[in-house]
Image (cartoon, rainbow, N blue to C red):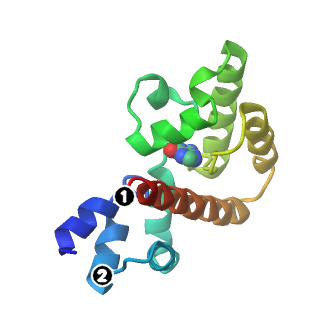
Amino acid sequence: METHDFIARYAGVYEHSPWVAERVAALATEVDNRERLAVLMADCVDNASTERQLALIRAHPDLAGRAQVAGELTAESTLEQASAGLDQCSPEEFERFQSLNTAYWEKFGFPFVMAVRGSDRAEILDTFAARLQNDYDLEFETALIEIHKIARLRLDAMGANE
Ligand code: GUN
């Protein structure tokens, strides 16, 4: 695949972070195995500087946040949030998400990231409240693990459309 086609195709696997696809493109554009591609992309993130990793985490919108309400999410995030019913919150659930989002940002300085596909709103809220009790290093590490899960799901969804 041509480098620019490769980058265009995989730029959205990591939210608002085309640099991951760009770096992998410099290594290999002939990766036809999704598993291998997922590993290369994940390695790229894991070997990036802490600043880049933090920027990647911060590139994620809040769950059930104002960007969702305003229709400003990426196509991928829109689907992920809708798959967990986050576009159907009751007013109480919506308020709960806003207060957790604020508390989480205040404590950690980045948004709560969770691969939400397959979970419902109650499970997500429980996990959110539990993770809010963690320390910074654990949440930073957990956010990256969740981001890799999201990337894997995005790659799998692309494969299904081939
Ligand atoms: N989990 C799956 N997609 C997203 C997203 O766009 N934002 C956050 N915070 N978590 C996610």
The residue sitting at 37% across, 69% down in the picture is: 20
Amino acid type shown at disc 1: Glu
Residue at the extreme bottom: 27
Labelled disc at residue 6:
none
Q: In the image, ligand 1 is in what quadrant? A: top right
Q: On the image, which quarter does residue 162 sit in? A: bottom left
Circle 1 sits on which residue?
162
Q: Residue furthest top?
A: 91
**Location of residue 149 in the rendering, given as x and y in whole percent from the top left corner:** 59, 61
Binning the other alpha carbons within 10 Å of mark 2 as few (below 14), some (14 to 19) or many (20 upward) gives few
Which amino acid does the dot numbered 2 rest on? Glu
Q: Is residue 33 above or below residue 139?
A: below
Q: Is residue 70 above or below residue 59?
A: above
Rendering coords of residue 115 (x, y %):
62, 51
The N terminus: image quadrant:
bottom left
Question: Taking 74 as reference, is 152 left or right?
Answer: right
* Mark 1 secondary-structure assignment: loop
Please tell me the numbered disc located at residue 30: 2
33 or 116, nearer to the observer: 33
- Give percent across and percent down for residue 60: 48, 48
Left or right of residue 137: residue 156: left
Q: What is the distance, in whole Å, between disc 2 and disc 1 at their CAs?
A: 16 Å
